[in-house]
Image: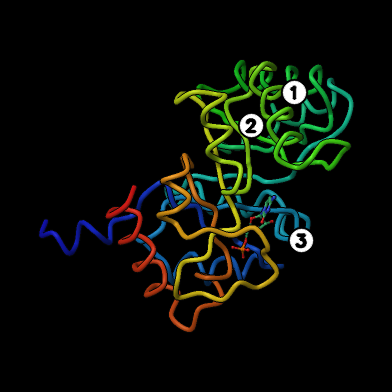
């Protein structure tokens, strides 16, 4: 393989967010991106419209799946829900850190007995502390509860990395390559900045999915990942 091809090979550190509302729109994007993308995020919009068919399609095509439903309920319900989606072959699932320690522990326990590999994360919930302290407090709680990592803004990645060490996943949305517009994201970073600050994986939606040429956008991002991560 020559150097040029290698730069554009799919990379699990790039997770493309499939924020569309139908199976057909998802299929169109996934088929167009083809071998360039190996990891997809299915969020509430797509899962609530098209359900587990989306997961089956992605798994049949050899993709990894991050199911971002931000589960938040009593520990027993969250634990069994995590087991259900793990059986579908989902690789990462988010639970809401606001659900507390017992809920996150149940999620981690059911994930671990249902699958070999699972990361569970959280989303910031707001609170009495300045955002940086609050995020760190929740990340610490998530780590203590036995989940594999967190979803966090690139702005908090470096302090979480310092607190949690290298063996903890930090998945960062809010990524805007220099060629892309900001959209509604407020706390953004480029792919290289995010990795420099300690991110493990990037979630990127509109800069790829709304691009005039999604494959060209994905190639530019893959190149930046390989050169800077
Ligand atoms: O299109 P864009 O790149 O902004 O998409 C970012 C994705 O990451 C969306 O699917 C969004 O739901 C998700 N996300 C986020 N911020 C969080 C948690 C998840 O943007 N705090």
Q: Say above or below: 82 vs 90.
A: above
Tell whether 217 sits left or right of 148. Answer: left
Dot 1: few (<14), some (14–19), or many (≥20) neighbours within 10 Å? many
Percent x, y of residue 44: 75, 54
In terms of sequence position, does the residue under pointer 2 or pointer 1 come before the other? Answer: 1
- Which residue has dot 2 on it? 120
Percent x, y of residue 164: 55, 24
Quadrant assignment for ligand 1? bottom right
Q: Is residue 206 visible?
A: yes
State yes or no: Cβ of the residue under disc 1 lies below 8 Å from any atom of ligand 1: no
Which of pointers 3 and 1 indicates the residue nearer the eye? 1
Q: Say above or below: 213 vs 34.
A: below
Which of pointers 3 and 2 indicates the residue nearer the eye? 2
Mark 1 residue element: helix
**Distance in Å between CA atoms under marks 3 and 1:** 26 Å
- Which residue has dot 1 on it? 104
- Which residue has dot 3 on it? 49
- The reply to whether dot 3 and dot 2 touch (C-beta < 8 Å) is no
Q: Is residue 35 visible?
A: no
Residue found at x 68% / y 19%: 110
**Mark number, residue 132:** none
Dot 3: few (<14), some (14–19), or many (≥20) neighbours within 10 Å? few
Tell whether 6 sits left or right of 221. Answer: left
Q: Say above or below: 117 vs 20.
A: above
**Distance in Å between CA atoms under marks 2 and 1:** 8 Å
- The reply to whether dot 2 and dot 1 touch (C-beta < 8 Å) is yes
Between 72 and 225, the one lying in front of the other is 225
Q: In the orientation shown, which residue stands out farthest toward the bottom?
A: 212
State yes or no: Cβ of the residue under disc 2 lies below 8 Å from any atom of ligand 1: no
């Amino acid at each position: 393989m020559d150097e040029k091809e290698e730069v554009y090979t799919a990379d699990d550190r790039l997770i493309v967010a499939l924020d569309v509302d139908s199976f057909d729109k998802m299929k169109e994007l996934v088929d167009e991106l083809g071998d360039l993308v190996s990891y997809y995020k299915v969020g509430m919009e797509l899962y609530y419209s098209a359900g587990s068919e989306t997961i089956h399609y992605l798994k049949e095509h050899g993709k990894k799946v991050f199911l971002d439903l931000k589960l938040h309920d009593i520990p027993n319900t969250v634990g069994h829900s995590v087991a259900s989606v793990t059986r579908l072959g989902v690789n990462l699932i988010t639970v809401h850190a606001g659900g507390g320690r017992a809920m996150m522990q149940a999620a981690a326990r059911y994930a671990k007995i249902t699958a070999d590999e699972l990361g569970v994360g959280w989303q910031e919930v707001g609170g009495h502390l300045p955002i940086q302290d609050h995020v760190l407090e929740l990340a610490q709680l998530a780590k203590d509860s036995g989940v594999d990592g967190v979803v966090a803004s690139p702005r908090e990645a470096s302090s979480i990395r310092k607190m949690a060490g290298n063996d903890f996943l930090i998945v960062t949305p809010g990524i805007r390559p220099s060629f892309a517009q900001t959209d509604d994201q407020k706390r953004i970073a480029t792919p290289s900045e995010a990795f420099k600050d300690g991110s493990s994986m990037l979630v990127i939606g509109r800069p790829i999915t709304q691009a005039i040429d999604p494959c060209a956008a994905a190639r530019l991002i893959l190149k930046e990942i390989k050169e800077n991560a």
